[in-house]
Amino acid sequence: MKTIKICVALCLFILTINENLFAANKLVNRFSNTQASEVYALIERILPGNSNSFLIETIADKKGVDSFYLASQDDKILIKGTNALSIAKGLNHYLKTYCHTSITWYANDKIEIPKQFPKVSSPVAEVCRFENRFFLNYCTFGYTTLWWKWRDWERLIDWMALNGINMPLAITGQEYVWQKVWKKFGMTEAQSRAFFTGPSHLAWQRMGNLDRWLGPLPQSFIDNQFELQKQILKRERSFGMKPVLPAFAGHVPFDLKQKFPNIKLTNLGSYDTGKQNDAYFLDPMDPLFIKIQKAYLTEQQKLFGTDHFYGADPFNEMDPPSWKPGYLANVARTIYSGMKAVDKDAVWIQMGWTFYYDRKHWNNPTLEAMIKAVPKNKMIILEYFGEKAELWRTTDAFFDAPYIWCYLGNFGGNTQLAAPLLKVSKLLPAAEKDPNKRQMAGIGTTLEGFGVNDFMFEWLFDYAWNADAENTTKWIKDYANSRTGNKDEIIEAGWAKLLPLIYNSQVSGVGLGNIIQSKPMLKRNGSYSSLSSYDYSALASILPVFLKANEESNRNARFERDLVMLEKQVLVNLALSFRDTIAKAYYAKDEKLFNQYTKHFLSLCDDVNSLTATQSELMLGKWIDDARSFGKTDEEKNYYEKSARVLVTTWGGEGNGITDYAAKDWSGLIATYYKPRWELFFDELRKTIKSGNEPDMASFDKKRAKFDWEWTDKNHSTQSFSPTRAPNAIKVCEDLYKKWIPYL
């Protein structure tokens, strides 16, 4: 009996060892595959300690398309895919659909991890229908990622992987490369730093729109961004993404004239920031042009490698030296010749915004000349603003050049609730099925800033894999559950009501804002604070639905954010009604009513300021704190803060025409910038209300512009802004709703 027990124990011991060895081998095997290991690392970042709940396998790519397969296997979740991006997309599908878990692109956002990973009831398989999935915009590197460090970029790249994006714009750190290039052409380090703008405006200098503004650029910033770009590219490529790196499009420092006095330069202006900041374009016929292109791409390839995609956008929002088709063809031919000389596989990525913005001059003959000057299929056009104007339909599909249908969706990081989901869900399928679509080579988004209507960007990339996303009613229902963390039928119904009201054809146009952000006036609104046209009272009637969410939903940070965004929109809409009542009171010389509603208006500003303080990405304090973190001394910190303040307010100097382009409902910005402007305006109106005369807006605008510019200067502004968000967002929403419901 004792012998039998020993034998049984020995067998069990051997079995245990074998099981452990099998598990260990399995662990080694799963990480031996580079593609799979990247996804396991991703899982550990977003779901710490839970990678063992998943089985990851790569499958053969037999048809040249990305695909994934999702199922349950024993007590694990099995995800197969053709590559890391396909597997990551399958993971995201599982988390959203089965776990009701939404992963955002913000590093500070908490991820709700389910207590137990639910089984996949029946296997799921999806195939991507678009080879290229493009993401980002030059402006995003100003309005959103300007002060980001690796922690922020790591989360964004994870988000891109989860959404199957394989073609991200990657323009960080290029000033380091340019410094080396300009040195080869006789410029000193100090000259190149003086040529660069301050950090906040680098995105526009990279597009050739201006130089020097808020510079010189600190060397420490240049070096920091160079190191960051290496991290970004390494991680993006580890997922199989092909980053789009910059190329030379003709924009040069004026100081090159000192070394090459005979070169021909054309002044392209500076967005009204002063003649000293004008940008210059080098004549493509000058031999120096191709030399600079070769020097830049050679240096960039040495430092960053290449995936053969290069962004170059000559004359973006600028007039070229000539509109003759032959001239523009020569420009394009020269730009690409320089690319090809360094990289025989080079593909030029050209943003179509240039052509949309000035369609009068970029007519079909000029556009055709430029496109056809480049070898066939070596230029890919980004259909930049597809929800507004599909240029492919009026240009013979860009004269048979490959193009990527893009949804723009956001200008300047504006925070208005408006997104054309119903419209885009018709446009995209129509384009995809059109027999005349020619070389539609992918889809993407060219958003200028993050911050609102995030679901539209997720829908777009979901559609690339799931044609059923065309059924927006079902899609938005599933999305609602991913935001609440559970099946909350009340919130499902709330999103269903939002869909036809503000997510139908409400295109997020330039300067889509609200009256609080507007330059103060009694009639109409500021040029960069255009208002949406839906029924504001209808939106206000949907808010109580969201206030009835169940307890589990109210505990979810994603739902909390959605509620805050919705209530914020209702309150800023209400501010328009108050402004109009103020105007009526002014013209009626009714001082009592005037004072009553100016008080209401300013109180509403305070409340929106308090409401937005509950969300970190809606806080001026975080924006400024992130900026100041780049400096080591007080002088450096103040320099970065100035740069941060200018971008989101005046953009240029005092009275600049782009003031408020990047208007945002941010806590701190409302309290110290927008509200005081309105107080200044109301005080001016009190001086003339008894006379009934029209206010002297020209005189007031000068005072307002002076206030705007002084606000950007730390020496004039002693306010400090907390980077830490306020607690109890749900209660704040409930209390503010009760306060303002009589007016809604």
Image (cartoon, rainbow, N blue to C red):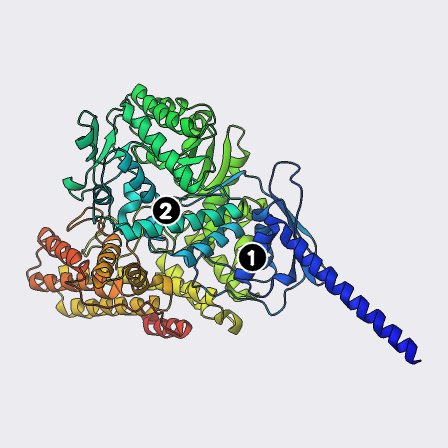
Residue 147 in the image: state x and y as whole percent.
33, 56
Furthest residue toward top: 326
- Amino acid type assigned to the residue bearing label 2 in the image: Thr
Residue 733 in the image: state x and y as whole percent.
38, 71
Please tell me which residue is depicted at 71% across the width and 63% down the height of the picture: 75
Left-right relation of 593 to 38: left
Q: Quadrant of the N terminus?
A: bottom right
Residue ID for mark 2: 172
Residue 674 in the image: state x and y as whole percent.
22, 61
| Residue 304 against residue 366 in the figure, above or below | below
Say the numbered circle drawn on residue 41: 1
| Residue 595 against residue 453 in the figure, above or below | below
| Residue 448 against residue 330 in the figure, above or below | below
* Foreground of the two, 649 or 292: 292
Please tell me which residue is depicted at 45% across the width and 46% down the height of the picture: 233
Question: Along the polypeptide, which appears first: circle 1 or circle 2?
Answer: 1
Please tell me which residue is depicted at 37% across the width and 65% down the height of the picture: 616
- Amino acid type assigned to the residue bearing label 1 in the image: Ala
Left-right relation of 417 to 476: left
Q: Quadrant of the C terminus?
A: bottom left
Q: Residues within 10 Å of mark 2 (few under 14, many from 20)?
A: many
Q: Is residue 581 visible?
A: no
